[in-house]
Image (cartoon, rainbow, N blue to C red):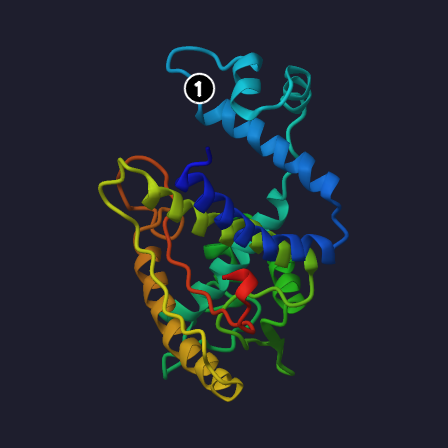
Amino acid sequence: MTSPTSTVLSRAVQRLLRPLVRILLRNGVSYGTFADLAKWVYVDLATREFGIAGRKQSTSRVAVLTGLTRKEVHRLRQPPMPGDREIAERYNRAARVIAGWRREREFLDAEGHPAALPMSGEAGSFTSLVKRFSGDMPVRTVLDELRRVGAITELDDGRVELVTRAYIPKTSETDKLHILGTDVAYLITTIDHNLRSDSTEPFFQRKVAYDNLPDQVLPEFRKLSSGKAQPLLEELDRWLAQHDRDTAPDIEGTGRNWAGVGIYYFEAPHSVEEE
């Protein structure tokens, strides 16, 4: 007999798969390709996180946990899954440059807004900004990336001006799809943490939503939510920058951790099928 938990979980999986499969179909990813990816993730997680303490995770045990054959498990454990490390690195470094430009006094004008920066100079220049916040990435590479996504404009006098409040890829499908793989994973990881019976300190997870709104109020709500959310994220960015070793090398402590807060807007026609 199917348990209530299994029924609810199956329905939840159907809901979260709908927008994902919509993206896959739009990008020509077949069910067979998706199934192979799912198999790889099952094997990878079963190997890494569901072993028995003090014992090496065997192919047979992974097969039992995943329901796959030993032959499939052996095949999937051989080559590593291709990654998107280059895209992730470019995204993270470009985002840090924009955040530093908006936050650090050296790169602000007299009114506290991001200043138009000369390309070169020991301080207060685009070159010094990039060197401080992008690690060893070449200045020209960062300039090209910010130009590509429409984050900057180059003035007639040679200075570079910031024209956006965040790094948002606008042209590259690969960059946008990379965000799918990170942001959605963070949200599901938070939900997973909160679902565990041993979770004594739940992570913050809230939303506000109504399901009978007229078309005419949506533009106003988009504007309102954006106006409230962006300042909060910028405040949290300033706090995190003061405690992250990449931007504050003197910070002491042990371990290396990710932490952050994500805010997202959603809207869609009401659909009983997707409730």
Q: Position of residue 143 (x, y in %)?
A: 62, 64
Q: Where's residue 131, x and y in %?
A: 50, 55
Residue at 58% x, 76% y: name it.
159
Residue 211 in view, yes or no: yes
Toward the front, the furthest residue is 1
User: Horizontally, is 41 left or right of 100 in the view?
Assistant: right
Residue 72 screen position, x and y as percent? 67, 21
User: Image quadrant of residue 228?
Assistant: bottom left
| Location of residue 268 in the rendering, given as x and y in whole percent from the top left corner | 55, 72
Q: Is residue 145 left or right of residue 182?
A: right
Reading the image, the residue beneath label 1 is 51
On screen, 154 above or below 27?
A: below
Q: Residue furthest left?
A: 200
**On the image, which quarter does residue 110 sit in?**
bottom left
Q: Around disc 1, counting alpha carbons within 10 Å, would you say few (fewer than 14), some (14 to 19), or many (20 or more)?
A: some
Tell me what residue is drawn at x 40 percent, y 41 percent: 4
Vertical comparison of 275 with 9: above or below: below
- Determine if residue 138 is in view: no
Q: Nearer the viewer, residue 31 or 132?
A: 31
Q: Secondary structure at mark 1?
A: loop
The outermost residue toward the bottom is 216
As drawn, 71 above or below 20: above
- Amino acid type at mark 1: Gly
Residue 257 occupies which quadrant of the picture? top left
Identify the residue shown where x is 61% and y is 77%. 153
Q: Residue at x 54, y 61 (%)?
A: 274
Exactly how many numbered labels are in the figure?
1
